[in-house]
């Protein structure tokens, strides 16, 4: 009886292993087994193993205990994802109760099948992002999970076939921290960006052919936390009123002033507490209305001068006539 | 008129499917040599279109677990990656149709455009890259034949060392002269690619994807190929066709896939390459950041224009972005 049970168990296990190994891609979490006790930051490396698949897009959720960790930084530098729809960055973290969640969604133009190098044969998993966490535990040593959930990849084909991928949960021991975490926030400062591009364009597929601006920035190095736009008649960006600034949720913004006769100022705030600005000049700084009014003013002045001239001429002529008449004929 | 019978070819292929992978590879190599040297080189003249009728009784059923048409090499990771001493960070070298323009993309953005020489060779060097992982892609704009699909490589590069991505064999183009061919008539398949390569042509039944018809021809010294197929060699129904070129060492990725039907009438479409037009949202002949921006604008929103919804599932989600990644031209 026992032998039969064991055989069935082994058979079931083999079947399970057979099916579980059928997953065509996986997200790998590299987490240390234990954090330091002096609030020293540590890295959680999230990688993507395409295995035998070619992938076109990836999505998932990174979760951790918000009472035990603070995010120091998140970097997507060297990531195999070229274009992010939902970039893993501090400003995208959502905390609900004791759990913090970071949603990531990205696209890999041309497909992804693993990373190659001259130093090894074949392909290896590629980096998605690195989260640097700071332990803030003050309530006694504890074991906590850091996990990737709801992950899905999309095959690199003309149908974008969804593919459920295997994910991981890793436990980390977090001892009581001897030093209380305190983050020194740098003062907001201006810093130029040589990777920022702002393009004004119009398209029938966006707001019925309305003019819009696309804000393009290499966020792998300097992730954007917030964008503000002001459409105003004020030339000097520093003199734009606070009430005129409008927060923009996407990297694409449809202009309110479709005639584009105002200045469009853009402020891009970065996660490292720096910001940069961009100004789009009015396309038509001599509007038709102004031109027309200037022409009207010009015509009015000419008429007035003509009138004065005629009036004066006739007045002088009359006076001269009177004078001559009095002098020679009286 | 030369008439070729490929009956022996079928027998060889059938025995191939039953052999182990090692002997299969060896046999395939020998067979390719035999076909390329004995049959094609000696039997087929320059203009196949007018002088050759191919009688192809080649219905081949393959094992579904390992389709032969994806066998020769892994298109995304097959090219050799080596290192050299040099001032460039990355050097990409390969072959395509002579005098075509090859676009080099870094993380989905075009960074270089080079012209292939009379032998079809191209070389592009990229400088000013930091150490890290990058996805490099290549595609060729072939005069009179459209663009090839994007071929991508995710590679770790290091500053101070030149990483060489070598022997890139860009896929040939494929065009068909009819979308439907009357049973008994001929359909002409043609295209352009790297000169003097062996061209593998695969016709797959839409009703049964395991039924693959495989033909071999050769690209001419000027990089052109053509193949005339008699529709009586295949049964009535819908088919997809794709090609790939290969040499002794490597195989290109597969070309774009074309569809045709063997029915009761001839429907001419002219010699053209069906491009990725359905992904080109703003109709500028490119699938790039502008299309991505438009799609990102409509991501998870309602009221989007129909052509943004590439998957036709009434929503803009990651499936659509994955399809966009598949069509990407940069």
Image (cartoon, coloured by chain):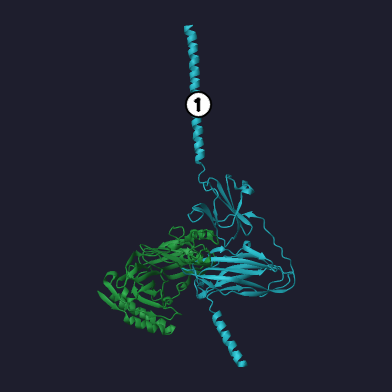
Q: Which chain is cyan?
A: A
Residue A127 location in percent, x, y? 56, 70
Q: Is residue B282 left or right of residue B177?
A: right
Q: Nearer the viewer, residue B301 or A71?
A: B301
Q: Nearer the viewer, residue B98 or B203?
A: B203
The secondary structure type at the circle numbered 1 is helix
Count of labels in the image: 1
Q: Nearer the viewer, residue A290 or A178?
A: A290
- Quadrant where the N terminus of chain B sits is bottom left
Q: Residue B189, located in which quarter of the rendered image?
A: bottom left
Residue A241 location in percent, x, y? 63, 47
Residue A297 against residue A39 in the figure, above or below = above
* Chain B drawn colour: green
Specify few, some or many for label 1: CA neighbours under 10 Å numbering under 14, 14-19, or 20 or more.
few
Residue B293 location in percent, x, y? 51, 59
Residue B43 against residue A262 in the figure, above or below = below
Q: Is residue A174 visible?
A: yes
Residue B22 against residue A314 in the figure, above or below = below
Q: Residue A106, located in which quarter of the rendered image?
A: bottom right
Q: Is residue B224 visible?
A: no
Residue A57 against residue A3 in the figure, above or below = above
Write down the residue under mark 1.
A305
Q: Is residue A179 left or right of residue B106?
A: right
Residue A103 location in percent, x, y? 60, 66
Q: Residue A96, located in which quarter of the rendered image?
A: bottom right
- Chain at numbered mark 1: A
């Amino acid at each position: 009886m026992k032998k039969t049970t064991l055989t069935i168990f082994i058979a079931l296990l083999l079947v399970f292993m057979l099916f579980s190994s059928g997953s065509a891609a996986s997200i790998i979490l590299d987490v240390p087994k234990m954090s330091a006790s002096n609030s020293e930051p540590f890295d959680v490396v999230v990688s993507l193993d395409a295995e035998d698949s070619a992938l076109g897009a990836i999505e998932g959720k990174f979760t951790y205990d918000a009472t035990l960790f603070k995010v120091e930084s998140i970097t997507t530098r060297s990531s195999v994802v070229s274009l992010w729809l939902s970039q893993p960055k501090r400003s995208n973290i959502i905390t609900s109760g004791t759990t913090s969640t970071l949603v990531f969604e990205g696209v890999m133009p041309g497909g992804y099948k693993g990373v190659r190098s001259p130093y090894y044969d074949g392909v290896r998993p590629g980096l998605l992002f690195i989260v640097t966490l700071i332990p803030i535990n003050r309530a006694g040593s504890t074991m906590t999970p850091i996990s990737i959930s709801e992950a899905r990849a999309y095959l690199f084909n003309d149908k974008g076939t969804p593919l459920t991928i295997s994910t991981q949960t890793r436990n980390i021991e977090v001892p009581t921290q001897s030093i209380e975490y305190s983050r020194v926030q740098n003062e907001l400062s201006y810093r130029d960006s040589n990777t920022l591009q702002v393009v004004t364009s119009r398209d029938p597929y966006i707001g019925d052919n309305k003019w819009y601006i696309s804000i393009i920035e290499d966020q792998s190095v300097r992730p954007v936390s917030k964008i503000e736009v002001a459409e105003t008649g004020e030339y000097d960006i520093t003199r734009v009123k606070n009430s005129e600034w409008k927060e923009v949720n996407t990297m694409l913004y449809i202009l309110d002033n479709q005639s584009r006769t105002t200045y469009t100022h853009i402020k891009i705030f970065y996660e490292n507490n720096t910001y940069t600005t961009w100004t789009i000049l009015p396309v038509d700084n001599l509007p038709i209305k102004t031109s027309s009014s200037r022409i009207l003013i010009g015509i009015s002045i000419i008429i007035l001068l003509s009138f004065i001239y005629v009036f004066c001429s006739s007045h002088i002529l009359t006076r001269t006539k009177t004078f001559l008449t009095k002098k020679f004929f009286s | 008129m030369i008439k070729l019978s490929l009956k022996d070819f079928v027998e060889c292929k059938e025995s191939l499917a039953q052999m182990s992978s090692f002997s299969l590879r060896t046999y395939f190599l020998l067979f390719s040599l035999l076909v390329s040297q004995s049959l094609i080189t000696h039997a087929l003249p320059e203009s196949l279109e007018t002088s050759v009728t191919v009688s192809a009784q080649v219905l081949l059923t393959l094992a579904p677990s390992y389709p032969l048409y994806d066998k020769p090499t892994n298109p995304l990771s097959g090219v050799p990656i080596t290192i050299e001493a040099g001032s460039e960070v990355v050097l990409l070298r390969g072959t395509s149709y002579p005098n075509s323009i090859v676009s080099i993309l870094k993380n989905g953005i075009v960074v270089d455009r080079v012209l292939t020489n009379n032998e079809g060779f191209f070389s592009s060097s990229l400088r000013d890259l930091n150490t890290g992982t990058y996805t490099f892609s290549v595609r060729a704009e072939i005069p009179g034949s459209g663009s090839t699909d994007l071929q991508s490589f995710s590679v770790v590069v290091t500053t101070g060392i030149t990483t060489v991505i070598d022997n890139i064999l860009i896929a040939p183009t494929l065009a068909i002269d009819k979308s439907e061919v009357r049973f008994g008539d001929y359909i002409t398949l043609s295209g352009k690619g790297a000169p003097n390569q062996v061209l593998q042509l695969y016709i797959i039944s839409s009703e049964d994807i395991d039924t693959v018809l495989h033909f071999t021809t050769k690209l001419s010294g000027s990089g052109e190929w053509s193949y005339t197929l008699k529709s009586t060699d295949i049964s009535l129904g819908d088919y997809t066709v794709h090609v790939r070129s290969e040499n002794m060492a490597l195989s290109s990725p597969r070309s774009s896939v074309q569809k045709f039907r063997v029915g009761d009438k001839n429907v001419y479409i002219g010699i053209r390459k069906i491009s990725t037009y359905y992904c080109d949202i703003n109709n500028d002949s490119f699938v790039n950041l502008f299309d991505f921006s438009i799609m990102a604008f409509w991501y998870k929103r309602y009221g989007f224009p129909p052509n943004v919804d590439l998957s036709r599932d009434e929503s803009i989600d990651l499936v659509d972005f994955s399809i966009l990644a598949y069509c990407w031209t940069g």
